[in-house]
Amino acid sequence: MTSPALAPARIALVGNPNSGKTALFNALTGARQKVANYAGVTVERKEGHLTTPAGRTLSILDLPGTYSLRARSPDEAVTRDAVLGRLAGEHEPDVLIAVADATNMRLMLRLVLELKQVGRPFVLALNMYDIAQRQGLRIDIEGLSRELGAPVVTTVATRKRGIEDLVAAADALVLDHENHANTWQEPTAAQIRAAHGEAQRIMRTYVKPAERPDTLTGKFDSVLLHPVAGLVILLTLLFVMFQAVFSWATPVADLIGEGFGQIGRLIALVVPEGLLRSFINDGIIAGVGGVLVFLPQILILFFFIILLEDTGYMARAAFLMDKVMGKAGLHGRAFLPLLSSFACAIPGIMATRVIDQKRDRLTTIMVAPLMTCSARIPVYTLIIGALIPQRNVWGWINLQGLVMFGLYAVGILSTLIVSAVIQRVFWRTGSEPFMMELPAYKLPDAGLVARQLWQRAMIFINRAGRIILPLMVIVWLLSTFPYPPEGATGPAIDYSFAGIIGHAIQPFLAPIGFNWEMSVALIPGMAAREVAVGTLGTIYAVGDAEGAGAHILQGILATQWSLATGLSFLAWYIFAPQCVATLGVVKRETGSWLWPTVMFSYMIALAYLASFVTFQSAKALGWG
Ligand SMILES: Nc1nc2c(ncn2[C@@H]2O[C@H](COP(=O)(O)OP(=O)(O)OP(=O)(O)O)[C@@H](O)[C@H]2O)c(=O)[nH]1
Ligand SMILES: [Mg+2]
């Protein structure tokens, strides 16, 4: 057995939402956890390590934000249990770092008083001290420290200022604290009221109001939160975002596509015609390259999302959408989980832990995959690029961008409709009013934005390497073997496993206009949606005697697919449960196979229906 003395001392970061705990955690441990300017970003405990100048290891715990140890939602319960040492197999932390937003301390002081009751030694970190200074806020740090009986340190987490002092203070507490029994009991309402009064007294005594308070936030909000002007601005922002995805990304994407084309030609020069060349060009380059081409689109979209998050605008968007979402039976706190689902439904589903009502949470989980995740972008972009002409409508609106905006809009609309149905038909409950503190606007930190973008790029490239590449190898094998029999007349791929499978499924998908190549692409697309793009690349490349590079696929689709077929494929991808990992997370978060089963069934039914209607109406319009 290891002696407890050898285990690193454990330090937990506790504080109100959006006070900069995760930014501090990253500064302390060098981790890269997500930070953003709204409440409820962190929903899980995260552990990291740091070595003090004296060479001792400290383990640091980042926790979800909370206003009180009286927890209501699952994420707040995580914080309470971590602080009290109630998590299975875990001691209570040796030292707490109470993280306060120095410009907004009132509610934090109340939590600090609660933490004091727990009896753990703690340091108070007055974070965002840069903003406090800019506002001319004066805090009597020594007096506060005396009053609370704990060291008080000022920090600027995003600039790594005050970190050494914080570590020194926490480290000193580790050394001289002794264990004593934890006798914490949930405070009564009366006790909380008393603590509230006490916090106000401390506030009045030690904090002089700001000389230059932030008036900009109020001014911006009078416009941005306006019920009409605010919504118009929100819609315009989203619209511009998708225009940009197409008009800015296309030249870069073309360049990357051209690059892969060059590599393919180079390989054709050095590698003799045969299996190896086919494997490299039709399998890897057409498959993985065909997906990587879409990196610029994804980065531009995330550039906007990160900017909106870091400025604090996203919290306003949540506020504006609250009415609409309430009508659809969604809880106000569902906005941010659904927003995260633009990246990927998995973090979105995990972020639903901020919702305290079980039914509201379940509703949000069930609709999260309808939001357009970034894995759909390659599929959407490929089909739009192939079948929608690159031209402007009404003079200045990029038609391809408009279609993309439309696909996102349909995703959002169906999220609202499905949740309304779930809430009305199954739960018959009303929705709760929205309560979320609106953070002050901040200028985004360029370094932070760049780092988050870089992280996004790495996630995408890693996926290409770890999930898409191996799948593409399998797809290539299936579409190359077995060879056609002697004297066969049709294209070789018709005799391969992929051809056989595709031809077998296709009859079921004929009513929605899918050809056999598309039918094959759906299967590996279950593991990761983007693989459908790579698979189409490989199938058409292997089937095509000329051999096609990643870049040429759009040209092939433009001649081989009708507009009706393409639109039907897009409709399928809006709804289809094309992602096994998401179903796995739903199982984990709900603790039963029932919900993933329900999700899979309703989504596949919707997908088939949507594609059927799309295909048949497009045909009727003469686009078949
Ligand atoms: N100017 C300034 N901004 C900061 C500082 N610390 C954090 N921020 C910003 O404040 C916002 C919130 O930071 P987070 O670290 O996500 O806050 P959190 O306490 O982990 O929030 P939750 O996980 O939602 O509880 C982000 O936009 C950070 O970039 C600071 O010291 N100065
Ligand atoms: Mg956090």
Image (cartoon, grey):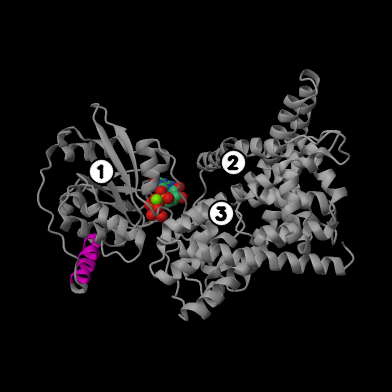
Left/right placement of residue 197 relative to residue 308 reads left
**From where the camera sits, is residue 398 visible?**
no
Disc sitting over residue 547 in the figure? none
Magenta segment: 191-204
- Give the residue type at disc 1: Ile
Which element is circle 3 on? helix
Measuring 65% from the left and 67% from the top, which residue is drawn there? 606
Task: Count all numbered tags in the image, as a single digit.
Answer: 3
Residue 11: give its label.
1
Q: Is residue 129 magenta?
A: no
Indicate the position of residue 608 as horizontal and vertical percent values. Answer: 69, 65
Q: Residues within 10 Å of mark 1 (few under 14, many from 20)?
A: many
Residue 169 lies in quadrant: top left
The residue mark sitting in front, 2 or 3, is 2
On the rendered structure, is 1 left or right of 436?
left
- Sequence-wise, the earlier of marks 1 and 3 is 1
181 or 587: nearer the eye?
A: 587
Please name the residue that numbered disc 3 is placed on.
308
Marks 1 and 2: which is nearer the front?
2
Q: Is residue 26 above or below residue 42?
A: above
Q: Which residue is mark 2?
A: 460
First in residue order: circle 2 vs circle 3: 3
Which quadrant of the rendered structure holds the C terminus? bottom right
Say if mark 1 contacts mark 3, CB within 8 Å: no
Q: Position of residue 556 (x, y in %)?
A: 84, 44
Give the amino acid at mark 2. Phe
Question: Looking at the image, can residue 366 be seen?
Answer: yes
Disc 2 from disc 3: Cα separation: 21 Å
x, y (%) of residue 518? 74, 51
